[in-house]
Amino acid sequence: MTKNTRDQFSGSSQLHQRTMCRPYCSLGAGNLTSFLWKSGDADSGWRYRFNLFRLAAQNGRVSQLFRPADLMDFVKFAQVMAAVIADDGCLSPVERGDLRRLATELDELLTRRTEPTNAHPASSNPEELH
């Protein structure tokens, strides 16, 4: 690593520490957990960053290795993250609208996914009950 590269890396690391030292919030879905950082200001614009890790319920260990079974949690995580950022109110109306739509569509997908496949709507017609 050259001195110039080291200085650039050091500078970006210091910027990260200065502007993103405390998470804005933590959130998760299933075994997935994340911290969300918000930096910037109203004049220069807001920036959001997040990490993602898997938390083992049995022993509290964390990992960034995921399993196929985590995929539904990824979808739920994306839905939650989109809703949280949209609700923060610091994005443009267009970006907030996009994130709200994404959150709604993912919620609908997850709702369909959890409904029993043999479920039938209840009928108020007595002839259909026999």
Image: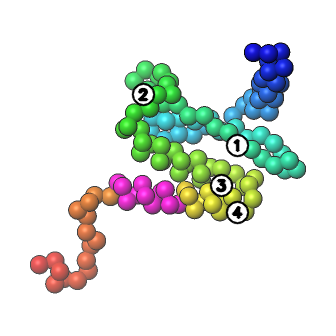
Amino acid, disc 4 = Val
Q: Earlier in the sequence, mark 2 or mark 3?
A: 2
Is residue 55 at all visible to an observer of this figure? no
The quadrant in which residue 102 appears is bottom right
Which range is magenta?
A: 104-114
Q: Calculate the distance from the C-alpha at mark 4 to the C-alpha at mark 1.
A: 16 Å
- Dot label at residue 86: 3
Separation (CA) of disc 1 from disc 2: 27 Å
Instruction: Using the rendered view, name the quadrant where residue 89 is placed.
Output: bottom right
User: How many residues crowd mark 2 within 10 Å: few (<14), some (14–19), many (20+)?
Assistant: few
Which mark is nearer the camera, 3 or 1? 1
Helix, strand or loop status at disc 2: loop
Q: Is residue 76 magenta?
A: no
Q: Residues within 10 Å of mark 1 (few under 14, many from 20)?
A: few
Instruction: Report the amino acid beneath label 2.
Output: Ala
Is 126 drawn above or below residue 19 in the view shown?
Answer: below
Q: Which residue is mark 1?
A: 48
Name which residue type carries label 3.
Ala
Q: Is residue 25 left or right of residue 70?
A: right
Amino acid marked by disc 1: Tyr
Q: Name the residue beneath numbered marker 4.
A: 94
